[in-house]
Image (cartoon, coloured by chain):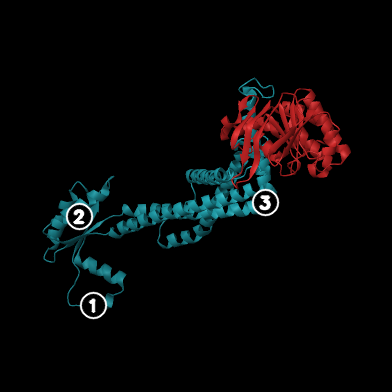
């Protein structure tokens, strides 16, 4: 009524209302926290569910990043073994070696004669005695070619491999790091899998959030009715529930961070032992600052969206009788 | 202030709660709405508070047709109507002060203004010393007065009361009515639904009587 017909004396001016709006946000922000702290156990349980759901993809993602970092070092050890035809003499092989060494995309070439190869094989394979039974040396001589590394080394290495294969002295040139490539392909699949898992678990968080807020709305339906009767807008009634979602999201994110950090910490010892056995220096890296930030932002976002969905659906259903 | 023009309300169940009700209540007027339970008193109040919409006819408040108030604007409209309920509708997890302050906080008053107005309203209903108490610790009459303080704290031009004395003894009822009289004397329009015939017969106010949804008697403006 009056709002349009005459100025109503009982309305605060616009500046006061804007100020009150922000103050009320701050109040509701802490009020909703206070409400949660009154039921610490159920708050903790809901946050734990969110935390665990988020910790899973986050942990896998971190492990994957570590694996990528670890295998990234292997690319630089790429080398091509060029097995020479058996009729190539030692001097011909030496000549070929110095030829290849002059190629622009080659960093180094090492020559392993048939005798050296046999000796090495006897030493490393454990088949020494079996080899002695053979009349002649079955091993070919080998040139180990290390390609120069550039940004698109993968493509260049492939070209180099083709050229080496086309040499008439070559029996077969073989890239030793083929398996690294396969590992990369596998990791790509795993990465996709983590993404899908993360998506599903994010959906689960939304549902958990929605259900929690739905229950909170039901518990406070009387309060909502009173608010509506005395002129509370939907936005006003929605606000405490949205902030509740915010807090759940934040707590869930923190719990996820703790879970992942603790898990990584607890497996870092054994991993260090393992890498030492491979004579490799590798320290498992934990969650980076950036990843932590994204984790928290994402979990808060999920908390807000989940509660928004529940609130906008259910608040309309509660009307004064 | 309140004008009903051939207003009817039929619920989706097919029940006709109000049939062709017409009357006009001027600004500052106080009136009783009476009739047996189920006669349509609550439905009539609900139409004014926009808890229900008319099926046919019109309800004008301050010459503004309520059919034109969109769902979004209902909260803003209700801020101009103080509603008092038989069951008080207080929030039991908040203090008396916080209960009464709620309409002001919703409207966005400053904290200082809220304090001032809440204490004025509590003073008016004689509960100034109970502001820190929780409603559950108060007597029925006191709870009702907290409900009244909350309804008037925003200084609405219109007050609706639905069986405000339903659970109170005659003396407390008379006190509550005294409060409504005071409000109407300062220009507030007051409409009180009650079936307490004994109480209203002692008071010199207009009486609207409903029976099976029809307005069967109106003693007229006094």
Please report the residue visible at 51 percent of the width from the left and 55 percent of the height from the top. Answer: A264
Q: Residues within 10 Å of mark 3 (few under 14, many from 20)?
A: few
In the rendering, what colour is chain A?
Answer: cyan
Q: Kindly identify which residue carries mark 3.
A: A40
Residue A133 horizontal side relative to residue B165, left or right: left
In the rendered image, which quarter is residue A277 located in? bottom left
Q: Kindly identify which residue carries mark 2.
A: A161
Is disc 3 placed on a helix, strand or loop?
helix
The mark lying in front, picked from 1 and 2, is 2
Q: Residues within 10 Å of mark 2 (few under 14, many from 20)?
A: many
Q: Earlier in the sequence, mark 1 or mark 2?
A: 1
Would you say residue B119 is visible in this rendering? no
Is disc 1 placed on a helix, strand or loop?
helix
Quadrant where the image shows the C terminus of chain B: top right
Task: Give me the C-alpha separation between circle 3 and circle 2.
Answer: 64 Å
Q: Which mark is residue A132?
A: 1
- Residue B213 percent location from the top left of the image: 68, 40
The verdict on a common chain for dots 1 and 2 is yes
Chain letter, disc 1 residue: A
Please report the residue visible at 62 percent of the width from the left and 39 percent of the height from the top. Answer: B9
Chain letter, disc 3 residue: A
Task: Give me the C-alpha separation between circle 1 and circle 2.
Answer: 33 Å
Query: Which chain does red denote in the image?
Result: B
Q: Is residue B34 above or below residue A88?
A: above
Residue extending farthest front = B216
Q: Earlier in the sequence, mark 3 or mark 2?
A: 3
In the rendered image, which quarter is residue A41 located in? bottom right
Chain letter, disc 2 residue: A
Q: Give the camera-side residue of B42 and A165.
A: B42
Would you say residue A31 is visible in this rendering? yes
Q: Which mark is residue B177?
A: none
């Amino acid at each position: 009524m009056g709002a349009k017909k005459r100025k109503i004396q009982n309305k605060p001016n616009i500046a006061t209302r804007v100020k009150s709006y922000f103050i009320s946000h701050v109040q509701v922000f802490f009020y909703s926290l206070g409400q949660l702290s009154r039921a610490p156990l159920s708050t903790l349980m809901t946050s734990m569910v969110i935390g665990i759901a988020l910790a899973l993809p986050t942990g896998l993602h971190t492990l994957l990043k570590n694996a990528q970092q670890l295998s990234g070092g292997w690319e630089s050890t790429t080398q091509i073994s060029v097995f020479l035809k058996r009729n190539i003499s030692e001097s011909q092989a030496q000549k070929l070696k110095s030829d290849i060494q002059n190629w622009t995309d080659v960093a180094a070439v090492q020559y392993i004669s048939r005798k050296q190869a046999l000796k090495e094989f006897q030493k490393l394979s454990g088949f020494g005695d079996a080899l002695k039974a053979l009349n002649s040396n079955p091993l070919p001589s080998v040139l180990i070619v290390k390609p120069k590394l550039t940004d698109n080394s993968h493509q260049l290495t492939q070209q180099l491999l083709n050229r080496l294969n086309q040499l008439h002295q070559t029996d077969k040139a073989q890239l030793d790091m083929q398996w690294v490539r396969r590992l990369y392909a596998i990791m790509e699949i795993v990465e996709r899998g983590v993404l899908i898992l993360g998506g599903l678990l994010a959906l689960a968080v939304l549902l958990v959030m929605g259900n929690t807020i739905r229950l909170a709305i039901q518990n406070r339906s009387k309060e909502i009715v009173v608010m509506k009767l005395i002129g509370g807008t939907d936005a006003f009634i929605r606000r405490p529930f949205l902030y509740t979602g915010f807090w759940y999201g934040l707590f869930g994110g923190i719990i996820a961070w703790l879970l992942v950090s603790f898990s990584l910490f607890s497996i870092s010892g054994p991993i260090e032992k393992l890498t030492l056995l491979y004579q490799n220096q590798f320290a498992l890296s934990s969650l980076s600052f950036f990843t932590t930030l994204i984790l928290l932002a994402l979990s808060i976002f999920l908390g807000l969206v989940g509660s928004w969905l529940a609130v906008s659906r259910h608040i309309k259903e509660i009307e004064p009788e | 202030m309140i004008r009903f023009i051939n207003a009817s309300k039929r619920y989706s169940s097919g029940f006709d709660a109000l049939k062709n009700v017409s009357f006009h209540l001027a600004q500052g007027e106080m009136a009783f709405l009476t009739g047996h339970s189920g006669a349509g008193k609550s439905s009539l109040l609900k139409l004014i508070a926009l808890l229900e919409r008319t099926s046919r006819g019109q309800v004008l408040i301050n010459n503004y047709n309520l059919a034109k108030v969109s769902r979004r604007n209902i909260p803003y409209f209700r801020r101009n109507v103080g509603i008092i309920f038989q069951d008080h509708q207080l929030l039991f997890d908040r203090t008396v002060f916080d209960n009464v302050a709620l309409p002001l906080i919703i409207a966005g008053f400053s904290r200082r203004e809220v304090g001032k107005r809440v204490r004025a309203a509590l003073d008016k209903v004689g509960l100034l010393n109970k502001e820190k108490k929780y409603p559950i610790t108060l007597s029925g009459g006191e709870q009702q007065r907290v409900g009244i303080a909350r309804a008037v704290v925003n200084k609405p031009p219109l007050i609706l009361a639905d069986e405000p004395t339903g659970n109170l003894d005659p003396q407390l009822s008379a006190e509550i009515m005294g409060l409504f009289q005071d409000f109407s004397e300062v220009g507030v329009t007051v409409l009180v639904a009650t079936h307490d015939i004994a109480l209203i017969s002692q008071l010199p106010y207009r009486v609207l009587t409903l029976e099976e949804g029809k307005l069967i008697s109106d003693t007229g403006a006094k």
